[in-house]
Image (cartoon, grey):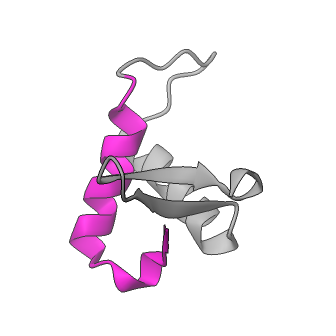
Amino acid sequence: MIIPYEQISAQALRGLVEEFITREGTDYGELEVDLATKVEQVMAQLQSGEIAITFDEASETVTLTPANQL
């Protein structure tokens, strides 16, 4: 099930995005990017429709999914 990001409070949305970003716990890029910048990048992807918030009813989990995988 797709959850429109506009229907989530700003605080909950930020928490979801931060949890998604820090889920792996390690940054393997050439340059380290701070959390605030990563949050801005993910928010831009949500707004552009590149990614969507999805809820899996079976596992009762929420994640961010690339639009091309929906």
33 is higher (above) or lower (below) than 8 = above
Of residue 31 and residue 41, the one placed in the foreground of this image is 41
Res 16 quadrant in image:
bottom left
> Where's residue 39, x and y in %?
44, 52
> Where's residue 20, x and y in %?
39, 43
Q: Residue extending furthest right?
A: 68
Of residue 14 and residue 58, the one placed in the foreground of this image is 58
Please state if 39 lies on the left or on the right of 22 as rendered.
Answer: right
64 is higher (above) or lower (below) than 10 = above
Please state if 30 lies on the left or on the right of 26 as rendered.
Answer: right
Please state if 52 lies on the left or on the right of 11 as rendered.
Answer: right
Marker count (numbered): 0
Which is the main secondary structure of the residues drawn in magenta?
helix
The residue shown at (60%, 73%) is 47
Res 24 quadrant in image:
top left
Q: Residue extending furthest left?
A: 11
Quarter of the image where the C terminus is located: bottom right
Give the magenta range: 1-24
Query: Is residue 10 located in the magenta-colored stretch of the structure?
Result: yes
Query: Is residue 29 located in the magenta-colored stretch of the structure?
Result: no
Q: Residue extending furthest bottom?
A: 7
18 is higher (above) or lower (below) than 3 = above
> Where's residue 4, x and y in %?
48, 78
The residue shown at (48%, 63%) is 53
> Where's residue 22, x and y in %?
35, 33
The residue shown at (68%, 71%) is 48
Please state if 64 lies on the left or on the right of 11 as rendered.
Answer: right
The residue shown at (55%, 15%) is 28
